[in-house]
Image: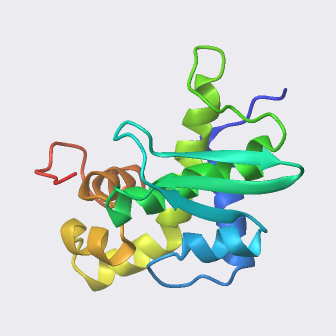
Amino acid sequence: MPMYTNEYYRKKAEELVKRFNISEPPVDVRKIAEELGIEVVEMTLKSWFFGVLLNVDDQFYITLNKAMPEHRKNFTLAHEIAHHQLHGGELAYMKNSKRDYYHREADIFAAELCMPSFIVKEESGKWYKDWRYLAKKFVVSEKAMVRKMQDDGILRQGNFDCAY
């Protein structure tokens, strides 16, 4: 399996954003899943369970814990879409030491899918870098928005008082 950079995973997510003509927040990750032929199912599950991508007879399903807040559902859905787009048949259903990198790749992809850099940069200029407002606008956690804005060089590195 070839090794790719974080930029590669961001670019793959950006390609999906552009493919579906997304130009403003929030990114409708449910619609993206639907357009990719992935059925999203929400169920009441244990609190530790976020979501999973399943392949049953070549039909893909994403199961989400319906008890999660919307921002967590969006990121989890984007993470599972990442597994679909990046890993296809090599699904990692549970975290384990041999496949931790699959989840890191999926997180990088998911952050870019939920918060495309080109849109975050544009919106942060309009809203004076108000990361709390932008988190609500993009339907992500404040912590995720701060991290994204720091990674994109919009906010300085440091600690921010973030709600999860």
Q: How many marks?
A: 0
Q: Quadrant of residue 138?
A: bottom left
Residue drawn at x 31%, y 61% is: 69
Looking at the picture, how far across and down is residue 70, in whole percent?
36, 66
Looking at the picture, how far across and down is residue 152, in whole percent?
42, 56
Q: Identify which residue, 69 or 150, lies in the foreground.
A: 69
Looking at the picture, how far across and down is residue 103, in whole percent?
57, 35
Residue drawn at x 66%, y 47% is: 53
Q: Quadrant of residue 60?
A: bottom right
Q: Identify which residue, 11 or 144, lies in the foreground.
A: 144
Q: Which residue extends farthest left? A: 161
Looking at the picture, how far across and down is residue 88, in whole percent?
81, 44
Q: Identify which residue, 9 or 100, lies in the foreground.
A: 100
Lateral position of residue 39 relative to residue 132, left or right: right
The N terminus appears in which quarter of the rendering? top right
Relative to 160, is 36 above or below? Answer: below
Q: Is residue 47 visible?
A: yes
Residue drawn at x 61%, y 50% is: 80
Relative to 89, is 154 above or below? Answer: below
Q: Which residue extends farthest top? A: 97
Residue drawn at x 70%, y 56% is: 61
